[in-house]
């Protein structure tokens, strides 16, 4: 039984372990968080496990990955217990994922409109004409000015910003409750990035979606997200409000912030991050 | 008044054939004093990297004038240019030969230019970029991204050039590694009295590294401004102002304004 005060997604002690002939690698080591109808950022450097968390929730990791959690509850169901078939109903339908680079994520041989319509038909088989209508409406919803024209274009004929909007349209058409966006704007120019963020922002506000925003860009999540989880070596070292990111306490978070050049705050030298082995001790921070 | 180290005057470039022929650079002009660090900023497709590629000799059919240390680029023999100006590329994973050891990568320019004392020079440069001689016999795949970018910088410095062209040298790296590379570049510039031309889409990186900068859009320079003007956010062109604001923070209102102008 879920009530409106329950979180949309509740994750407790999520772990991802890769076992191979070369040994055991723990990519995610006990991550816990709750997500409501808000924008939650997961930030960290490459290899921190931030993308792995997103993929583990959708069960998109390869078979060599062993995913466990005490709780991984979404809309009252335990995601990790779902059969592959049941998971297919959740994936794309209730939880969608937006990837970094539209160039590689869109099918180059299909027009972008057909790809958006296909996303609808997967969950509503047979409704061809309706799918087209929905796709056009969805393209308009992500602020594409001439949806009829763009519908017939191939991915190579559109810009990166337009491609990312098409991806968002595709993810939204089944009307998900949760969007996981993995570096959705890193490949985009700043002015285009701003517009794509505005679309996501409006969706969270107007439709009451939950958004997990995976990013390496501290400056951006500070002003965009409600809450921020900072990951290091598979663990969440600190959790803060986005607006209070500058008051981070953990030495790793402080180090990251200090190594970042910022407009109007020039220092002679940027401070360099020192990584301490004790940060790796499990449970030390939470 | 010191003579400029690098002078670009009315640089224009067309690419493509027939109906697809496009003007990529349209009358770009700027100049750098010796020891200065100058930034080129702009969004993708603005032509900022193309300017570097013209100076590095990767495009040859441009029009206008490029002067290196007072002498037109066109009048200089190729080898002469290489001794004066070198380039560091964006992607340290793509710019190093995967089957050459670091030793081979660094010694190659010396061999081409008939410079002796190879062992000592390679060791010295590896120490200078903070890696040390023990990296000589490794392959690029045994190195991290930051270490590879250090090798790419070392390679650019082998011929003891006066000018470094830096094309997004840290955009493929994590922020903590970016800080290390930017500090290294700043140290090298002072130590070796280098002149930098840095291309970046990140205005904060440019503010940190450069004395002044030019904002490019659609092959033209929109505005040339000082580091102080950038830091105070008081440029003249509205495009520059929008770019600065968009770099600082997410702002729902500004997003609306940008969408309407688009």
Image (cartoon, rainbow, N blue to C red):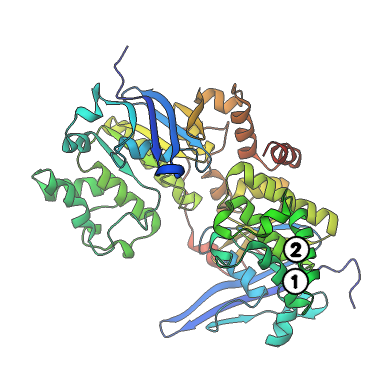
Provide the chain ID for the residue under circle 1.
A
Q: Are marks 1 and 2 in contact (CB under 8 Å)?
A: yes
A42 vs B124, left or right, is right
- Which residue is at the front of the view, A81 or B90? B90
Q: Does the image show residue A101?
A: no
Above/below status of B42 relative to B92: above
- Residue B57: percent from left, percent from top: 28, 39
| Mark 1 neighbour class, 10 Å CA radius: few under 14, some 14 to 19, many 20 or more | many
Secondary structure state at the residue bearing disc 1: helix
Q: Callout 2: few (<14), some (14-19), or many (20+) C-alpha neighbours within 10 Å? A: many
Q: Residue at x 76, y 73 (%)?
A: A128
First-in-chain label (1 vs 2): 1
Of all chains, the one bearing label 2 is A
Q: Give the number of marks.
A: 2
Q: Position of residue B240 (x, y in %)?
A: 59, 29
Residue matched to label 2 = A135
| B115 sits left or right of A25 in the view | left
Residue A223 pos. (x, y %): 70, 45
Furthest residue in direction top, as rendered: B1
What residue is rendered at 53% in x and 36% in y? Answer: B203
Q: Quadrant of the C terminus of chain A?
A: bottom right
Q: Quadrant of the N terminus of chain A?
A: bottom right
Which of the pair A191/A141 is nearer the observer?
A: A141
Query: Pointer 1: what residue?
Result: A120
The residue lying at 26 percent from left, 32 percent from top is B162
**Mark 1–mark 2 distance (CA, rounded to whole Å):** 8 Å
Q: Where residue B214 appears, x then y in whole percent?
A: 48, 28
* Pick the front one: B244 or B80: B80
The relative height of residue B199 versus residue B34 in the rendered view (above or below) is below
Q: Is residue A138 visible?
A: yes
Residue furthest front as drawn: B18
């Amino acid at each position: 039984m879920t009530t409106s005060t329950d979180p949309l997604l509740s994750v407790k002690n999520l772990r991802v372990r890769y076992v191979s002939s070369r040994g055991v690698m723990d990519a995610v080591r006990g991550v816990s968080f709750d997500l409501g109808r808000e924008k939650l950022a997961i930030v960290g450097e490459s290899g921190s496990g931030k993308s792995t968390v997103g993929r583990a929730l959708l069960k998109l990791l390869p078979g060599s990955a062993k995913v466990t959690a005490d709780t991984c509850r979404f809309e009252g169901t335990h995601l990790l217990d779902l059969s592959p078939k049941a998971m297919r109903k959740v994936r794309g339908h209730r939880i969608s994922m937006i990837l970094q680079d539209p160039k590689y994520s869109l099918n180059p041989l299909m027009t972008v409109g057909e790809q958006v319509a296909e996303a609808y038909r997967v969950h509503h088989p047979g409704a061809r004409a309706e799918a087209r209508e929905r796709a056009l409406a969805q393209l308009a919803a992500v602020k594409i000015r001439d949806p009829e024209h763009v519908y017939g274009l191939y991915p190579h004929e559109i810009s990166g910003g337009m491609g990312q909007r098409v991806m968002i349209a595709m993810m939204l058409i089944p009307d998900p409750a949760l969007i996981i966006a993995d570096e959705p704007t890193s490949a985009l120019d700043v002015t285009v990035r701003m517009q794509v963020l505005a679309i996501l922002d409006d969706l969270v506000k107007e439709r009451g979606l939950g958004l997990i925003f995976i990013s390496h860009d501290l400056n951006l999540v500070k002003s965009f997200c409600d809450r921020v989880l900072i990951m290091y070596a598979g663990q969440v070292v600190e959790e803060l409000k986005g607006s209070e990111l500058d008051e981070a306490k953990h030495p790793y978070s402080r180090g990251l912030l200090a190594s970042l050049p910022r407009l109007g705050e020039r220092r002679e030298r940027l401070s360099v991050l020192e990584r301490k082995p004790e940060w790796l001790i499990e449970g030390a921070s939470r | 008044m010191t003579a400029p180290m690098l002078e670009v005057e009315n640089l224009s470039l067309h690419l493509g054939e027939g109906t697809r022929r496009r003007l990529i650079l349209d009358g770009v002009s700027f100049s750098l004093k010796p020891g200065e660090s100058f930034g080129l900023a702009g969004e993708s497709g603005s032509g900022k990297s193309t300017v570097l590629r013209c100076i590095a000799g990767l495009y040859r059919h441009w029009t206008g004038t490029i002067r290196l240390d007072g002498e037109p680029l066109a009048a200089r023999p190729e080898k002469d240019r290489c001794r004066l100006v070198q380039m560091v590329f964006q992607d340290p994973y793509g710019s190093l030969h995967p089957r050459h050891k670091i030793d081979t990568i660094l010694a190659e320019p010396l061999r081409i230019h008939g410079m002796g004392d190879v062992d000592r020079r390679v060791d010295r440069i590896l120490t200078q970029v903070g890696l040390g001689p023990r990296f000589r016999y490794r392959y690029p795949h045994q190195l991290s991204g930051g270490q590879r970018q250090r090798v790419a910088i070392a390679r650019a410095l082998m011929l003891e050039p006066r000018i470094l062209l830096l094309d997004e040298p840290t955009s493929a790296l994590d922020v903590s590694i970016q800080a290390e590379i930017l500090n290294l570049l700043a140290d090298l510039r002072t130590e070796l009295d280098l002149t930098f031309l840095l291309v970046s889409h990140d205005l904060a990186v440019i503010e940190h590294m450069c004395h002044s900068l030019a904002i490019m859009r659609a092959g033209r320079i929109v505005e040339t401004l000082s580091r102080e003007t950038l830091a105070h956010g008081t440029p003249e062109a509205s495009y520059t102002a929008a770019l600065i604001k968009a770099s600082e923070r997410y702002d729902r209102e500004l997003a609306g304004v940008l969408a309407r102008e688009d």
